[in-house]
Amino acid sequence: MKLQLALDEMPLVDALRFADKVAEHVDIIEIGTPFVMDEGMRGVREFHRFFPDKEILADLKIMDGGYLEASYAYEAGAAYATILGVSDNLTIEGALKAARDFERKLVVDMICVEDLPSRIAKMEEIGVDILAVHTGADQQAAGREPIEDLKVMTENAKKAQIAVAGGINSKTIDKYVALKPEIIIVGSAIGHAEDPVAEAKAIKDAML
Ligand SMILES: O=C([C@H](O)CO)[C@H](O)[C@H](O)COP(=O)(O)O
């Protein structure tokens, strides 16, 4: 089980310093969507350069132009790029072709997918690598969490690896670990913690 640290809100230099502090507890470093919007692929390139031993994920949340946009992430050194599960199947197939051409992985973010079981089946038919259950920041603010969607995902996914994100922290980690996803994604709980190293360690320890 891998811990993915989502870096969403910091400027590049602060993010590099922050990641350096918590890196020993983290397996995948995510260049989050707001970060990508702010810095573009420079964020991906710099993290790949400074953390050659970590896998980098570019959270592009692609919605169109699947091959071209996923290629940007892989060319910059990302091991993973994300695409939205609500995208057209042609867009997903294009991004997956880029993943195959670069020998990297594609993560489908299932945020706002209404019929999870049927979309999971379609994504697996297309052959995507990883399916991510995700309760977004705006949904979290309305009191939602991803645990029920994760149960649906674990009951329906047959081949794809499973990731989960959405406000997970050291107090809630155990119920997610119990469902055995391959990747647990944590952003604000570590990024906003008084002691980020202790929070990252507590979360990673719960996964061991
Ligand atoms: O993907 C994310 C969100 O949409 C902002 O871009 C976050 O990186 C992801 O949800 C993890 O962050 P937390 O929910 O704060 O743990």
Image (cartoon, rainbow, N blue to C red):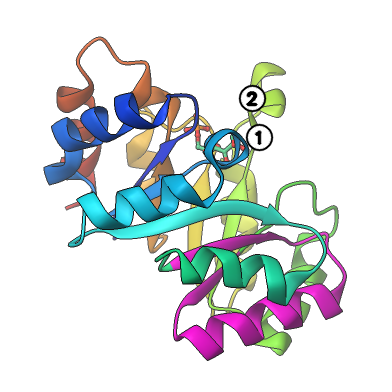
Mark pair 1, 2: CA separation: 6 Å
Residue identified by numbered label 1:
136
**Kind of residue at badge 1:** Gly
Q: Is residue 177 above or below residue 15?
A: below
Q: Are marks 1 and 2 in contact (CB under 8 Å)?
A: yes
Q: Secondary structure at mark 1?
A: loop
Query: Could you say whether the residue bearing mark 2 is in a helix, strand or loop?
Result: helix
Q: Is residue 156 magenta?
A: no
Residue at x 25% of width, y 36% of height:
19
Q: Residue 34 at what x, y percent from top left?
A: 59, 33
Q: Quadrant of the N terminus?
A: bottom left
The reply to whether residue 171 is visible in this rendering is no
Name the kind of residue labelled 2 in the image: Gln
Cβ(mark 2) to ligand 1 < 8 Å? yes
193 on left or right of 153: left
According to the picture, the residue beneath numbered tag 2 turns out to be 140
Question: From what the image shows, is residue 48 above or below residue 66?
Answer: above
Magenta stretch: give its range.
80-107
Where 92 sits versus 16, above or below? Answer: below
Q: Is mark 1 within 8 Å of ligand 1?
A: yes
Report x, y in % for residue 38.
Answer: 58, 33
